[in-house]
Amino acid sequence: MKYELKIEQSEDSDGSIDLFRLSSIAESLKRIAEGALLLRIKGLSKAKKSFNLTNALKVNLTGVQKGSTILCLESEKFEKTLPSFQTDLFRLDYQKDLHEKTPISLVVESFKEALENPEKSDLLDKPLLKDLLTFKKSFLSDREIFSITNEGSIEGFTLVKSDFKKIQITETEIPSPEAVIVSGRIEELKFSNQRVKILTQEGLVDAFLSENFIPQDITAWWGKEATVTGTMHHKPGKRFSIEIERIFDKEAGDDFFSKRPKHENLEEQIQRQLAEGKDLNPLKLIVGSWPGEETDEEFDELLKSLD
């Protein structure tokens, strides 16, 4: 598939690009594409790779054209580059057409998900949002505009430097991964032996098997009550998925863990802190007031002050 990555009002000379900037763009595209691909296959953008993705993530630069600066890119569809054993697992809605995607199309989709409706997206997590933020380094000025087209098939995708403010707020609101214990009935998913649901007293919890967990070992637990330990990976919109690392017979007292894990978003944390009489969290300056008139530098300093 052939693509054009255009930098309008580029700080580089017309039809040229600095090699260090080109390297930065290439590295960001690769990191985003890899994270988006692993998220679709494994359920986590930073999942361990048990297979080689070198060919699948390959993107060739075939030329640089004038018209500001236009990078001509080319990459193969995943149906030609991913081993067949991986595509056998593609059963979720966002996996069904993955064989038709390319690394560049996943980059475009990830930015669109982050900018248009992140709280309802299953295709974003905290590490992938951090990877999206690395692309900000590709901008040399606030007036530059990046766009990607595929022979007219990708329409309306443009990226400006101020877009990263929204992405950064979304990433900041998502808690870091944390250890978790959950008890409930292990529900089988017909489309994959690596993904499960845990039926707790408060409803279903999405889960998937860690790389160290043998998929065949989960079959003995279908329909049974069990307690699992693992890592809770948060997503936008207070959603999450649990990476199962160990599973045990449910014992007396484990009902304490038969609840859906919860976390507070930033605005809820602010309200709780105020109710407890704590000092005002400076994040209140952001929640409900973005975007404002602050510069990128002022915005970055505001986020740093939260640490």
Image (cartoon, rainbow, N blue to C red):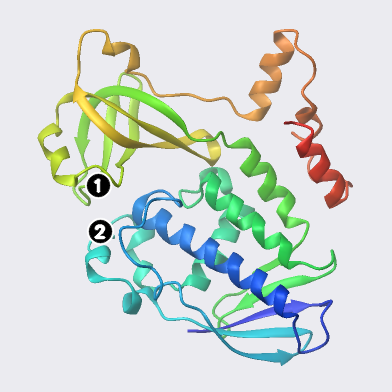
Task: Out of 208 and 110, give the one closest to the viewer.
Answer: 208
Left or right: where 26 falls relative to 293: left
Residue type beneath disc 1: Gln
Real-space CA distance between mark 2 and mark 1, rounded to the nearest whole angstrom? 9 Å
Badge 2 or badge 1: first in the primary sequence: 2
Left or right: where 11 falls relative to 178: right
Name the secondary structure under disc 1: loop
Residue that carries the numbered disc 2 in the rendered image: 89
One can see residue 156 in this view = no
Taking the view exactly as shown, the residue that stands out farthest to the left is 220
Q: Residue at x 55, y 44 (%)?
A: 126
Residue type beneath disc 2: Leu
- Tell me: residue 226, above or below residue 286: above
Left or right: where 11 falls relative to 106: right
Q: Which mark is residue 6?
A: none
Residue 17, image x, y percentages: 74, 82
Callouts 2 and 1 close, C-beta under 8 Å = yes
Residue that carries the numbered disc 1 in the rendered image: 194
Q: Residue at x 70, y 85 (%)?
A: 70
